Image (cartoon, rainbow, N blue to C red):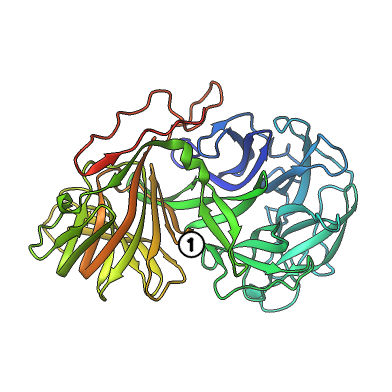
Amino acid sequence: MYASHGFLRSDIGDVDVLYHDGVFHLFHLVLPNHDFIAHAVSNDGLSWRRVKNALYVGEPGAWDDDMLWTMHVSPDPYQPGRWRMFYTGLSRHEYGRVQRVGLATSTDLLNWNRVDGEGYPLEVSSSYYESSVDEGRRWVSFRDPFFYQDPESGRRMLIASARVNTGPLVRRGCVCVADEVSPGNFEFKPPLHQPRIYDDVEVPNLLQINGRYFLLGSIREDTKVHYWYADELDGPYLNFFDNVLLPSGNYAARGCQFGDQWLLFNFFTKQENHFGKDITKKLLPPPKHLVTDSTGRLRLKSYGGFDALVQHQCTVSIPDKLERLFDNPLAYSKGSQEEMHLGCPSGYEAFLLPNDFESFRLRAQIGLEGSGKCGMVLRVNAHGDGYYLSLDLFKGVAQLRAWGVNGPAESEHAFTYEQLQAGYFVSRDEGPWDLEVLAHGMYLEVSINGYVILSLVDDAYGDGKLGFYTESAQIVLRHMSVEKLYPPEQEEPSGPMYTSITTQPPPDMVPTDLIDGQPEKKRIE
């Protein structure tokens, strides 16, 4: 987990991540001022250390002396060994109403120099796009640049968030494109994609995965990350019946090539209360693997970097010794080491594993017997306060809630019941379903049948019991294991680069007759 720090409110903004020579380089905005682009590095994509800031706003009178917005870093196709950062800038003279795209270069990813002149900054073309403050919404949209070089044709393209100059006012959002025909010489083309329904398509990415082109964009109307696909570079770009890549709260996603794989990074917006005032806090959660499934849809898988954080692995083997949270006399647990049946014909019951869990990864195959309700409890205490994961396995809906006591029990407001996030998956008629639940500090993630469904950040409950609940239902669990993870490390202000690996491992979990301990995995140093 990574976040900006500062007095009162200080947030990370849009992010861009580059993997080079075994190091992840994170470039991000700092909100609310937007006055510089920060730079952080990581060995594992999980723990980050700030290094020299990449770029500051221009001197008074410069075209970018007001704010800096989203950037993209990529290799210079004309000068090997050099890097280019396209970035968005705004001018104080124009009250920030005109967005332009500038360029900075570097030979080491650490020291950056603006390119003055030589065709920069770029201004959006009036041939296809709104280009004057007298049009549309009275400001010029041309931001969030992304440079793409097609591996098939060699075509070099700069895409960005812009707006066409005709059509309904809040439906003009599009992904504009300009071909780089020579160094710094761009020719604007018609939009690469125009959904014709959104006000803007923010932070666009263009990726080629398994021979298909995928266009990613963040939509303000529902604050989700969407995607479209095409078999040809110029489109047309289509969408599946569900083209939401990340659920609500996740935004401004950017792809990062990681060897022969793709990772997806984004920020997550979390609600907080400071000095009695509700504010939003933006954080960088762990990345996910971008893959395609058998139907060609773009999907997300849990990040493999968590494998290096496994401290202790255990399997559940004796079902009749699971603790019961609500002491429901109708509840029962039975079965064997290979297969456990947990049920409660009337009312709730939660079946808890021994020991408290803070950071963990649980994997199990779950089946539902009957037509009742089921799910999981995470980090619950003896009163049942904690996270409740509702699983509608037939409709394909997963919902995570924070549910517990809220202050003195003197009124109808004595409890909190907060819906944190909902996600959807294509269900199977009869199951079973492969379930993976991961908690790493404030980060919570749920995968169904191998694909990430929920991804969020919350700190209402830090540790507690872990288990499954049923309500007028029976579930069957197979191949269940729990891995205790090393907790997240805090960023250090100085010193050598580090990873999430701790130098002194925490104590092993207490062995019980319910848990069969497995040999501790060797850590990757």
Question: In the displayed image of the protein, which residue is found farthest to the bottom?
Answer: 168
In the image, taking residue 448 as reference, residue 328 lies left or right, namely left
Q: Quadrant of residue 338?
A: bottom left
Residue at which label 1 appears? 247
In depth, the one of 80 and 14 nearer the eye is 80
Residue in front for this viewpoint, 138 or 144: 144
Crowd tier of the residue under label 1, counting other residues whose Cα lies within 10 Å: few below 14, some 14–19, many 20 or above: many
- Quadrant of res 164: bottom right
Q: Locate residue 414, reporting x and y percent.
A: 17, 58
- Classify 56 as above or below 184: above
Q: Quadrant of residue 496?
A: top right
**Kind of element beneath mark 1:** loop
Residue at 43%, 72% (x, y): give it: 427
Task: Count the labels in the image.
Answer: 1
Residue 56, position as x, y percentages in the image:
68, 37
Three-letter code, disc 1: Pro
User: Does residue 63 appear anywhere in the picture?
Assistant: yes
Q: Residue at x 63, y 34 (%)?
A: 23
Residue 208, horizontal then vertical, whole percent: 71, 58
Asked if 255 appears above or below 3 in the picture, the reply is below
Quick one: 428 or 285, which is closer to the camera? Answer: 428
Q: Residue furthest top?
A: 495
Q: In the rendered image of this protein, does residue 250 appear above or below residue 75?
A: below
Measured as percent of width and height from the top left, residue 396 is found at 41, 71
Looking at the image, residue 273 sits to the left or right of residue 251; the answer is left
Q: Residue furthest right?
A: 182
Q: What's the residue at 27%, 41% (across, down)? A: 516
Residue 10 can be seen in this image = no
